[in-house]
Amino acid sequence: MVNTHNEHEYAELHHPPGYAFNKNMSREKVSVWIGLCGNGSLVGPYFFEGNINGRAYLDMLNNFIVPEMEQIFPRQRRGAFRRAWWAQDGAPAHRLIAVRNRLTELFGNRIIALHFPVEWPARSPDLTPCDFFLWGYLKGKVFQTPPATIQELRQQITGEVNRLRQDQGMIRRAVRDMRRRCELCMERNGGHVEGTHP
């Protein structure tokens, strides 16, 4: 089996006799959403079924994120999170008008995202706590013993998230480090920010 995502053919090649190219159409995947809060809390994990579109993202916001955040921030009134900021990239699912309207209801002008007053800079994966810390940390833990099935992968992700949830100091440091990274990025005129894990 050849992973065509990693294969590049720059010139015509003559393959050896018996060579057969089969594209793997049955590759399973897991799409998971996890949020980090500055007070050291975690929201999630939330596993998407099928493709992630605007409607699925909106359902996740309403049926999963809002109830979890209401548990984390119990003093909020009428479902509006008056002190929390929401940051997301420009993925197509995030741009649905109903999603944008719902985020505005929940967070007011404290949204960092495409098509909002505070736009997240394009191609800036080394700034977000999920990208510079969380995903690498979880992969390192989850794949110490590679899961044999999708269900086992989900269980291992959930288990590691629950263990990380107990280390609120680490989560707070990861979120706090975002400001330092943004400042470094500005100092470097948008250049790459080398980093360390919290």
Image (tube, helix red, strand yellow):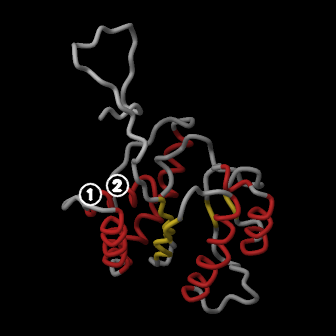
Which secondary structure, mark 1?
helix
Residue corresponding to mark 1: 140
Q: Which of 180/122 is in front?
A: 122
* Discs 1, 2 touching: Cβ within 8 Å: yes
Residue 72 x, y percent position in the rendering: 54, 85
Which amino acid lies under the numbered mark 2 shown in the image of this protein? Gly
- Left or right position of 90 against 148: right
Q: Amino acid at mark 1?
A: Gly
Residue drawn at x 33%, y 64% is 153
**Residue reaching furthest bottom?**
75
The answer to which quarter of the image holds residue 24 is top left
Q: Is residue 137 above or below residue 15?
A: below
Q: Residue furthest front?
A: 18
The residue beneath circle 2 is 136
Q: Nearer the viewer, residue 160 or 39?
A: 160
Work out whether 129 lies above or below 194.
below
Mark 2 surroundings: few (<14), some (14-19) or many (≥20) residues within 10 A: few
Q: Quadrant of the C terminus?
A: bottom left
* Element type at mark 2: helix
Give the residue drawn at x 74%, y 64%: 99
